[in-house]
Image (cartoon, helix red, strand yellow):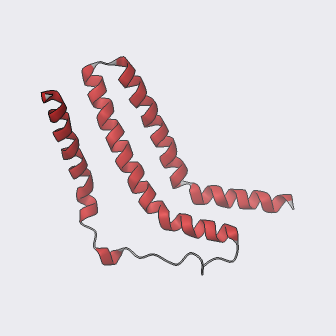
Amino acid sequence: MKHFFTIAIMDAAMLSLAFFPVAGLHAAAITFENPVTASNSLVDLIISVLKQIQPFMMMLAALGILWIGFKLVIAVGTGNQADITKWKSLFAYALIGAAIIAGSVVIVEAVRKFAAGIK
């Protein structure tokens, strides 16, 4: 039970450190553009929505990578091979997901150009 509270306190400390840069943002600095008025087609709407949610999703991906990295370090410290394998694979999946989020607009543009070339 003592070990559980130690890990819980360490997890809370890591999360609070991760939120310090976000806490400095002012509410007035965050603005959202209406994605419906900026679009002439469905693809334009998708790109506009992606551009709006991409910073938030990247922040979530960064927090996920931090959390998984922290859990991986704990697993390595305990020497539990099953947990090490689990957290390594989750770390790889988180990096792949972050790359997909970062390149989402480029992916949609590539699909649009490919589809336009088929016509």
- Between residue 3 and residue 40, name the one nearer to us: 3
Extreme residue toward the bottom, this view: 37
x and y percent of residue 83 in the render?
Answer: 36, 24
x and y percent of residue 62 in the render?
Answer: 38, 49
The image quadrant that residue 118 belongs to is bottom right
Extreme residue toward the right, this view: 119
x and y percent of residue 10 in the render?
Answer: 18, 39
Indicate whether 79 appears above or below 48: above
Q: Is residue 77 left or right of residue 84?
A: left
Q: Point out the image quarter for the C terminus.
A: bottom right
- Look at 15% across and 34% down and name the residue there: 6
Indicate whether 10 appears above or below 18: above
Q: Is residue 35 left or right of residue 1?
A: right
Q: Point out the image quarter for the N terminus.
A: top left
Numbered marks: total: 0
x and y percent of residue 50 in the render?
Answer: 55, 63
Extreme residue toward the front, this view: 1
- Look at 12% across and 29% down and name the residue there: 2
Indicate whether 18 appears above or below 29: above
- Look at 59% across and 77% down and name the residue there: 36
The image quadrant that residue 55 belongs to is bottom left
- Look at 29% across and 36% down and name the residue there: 70
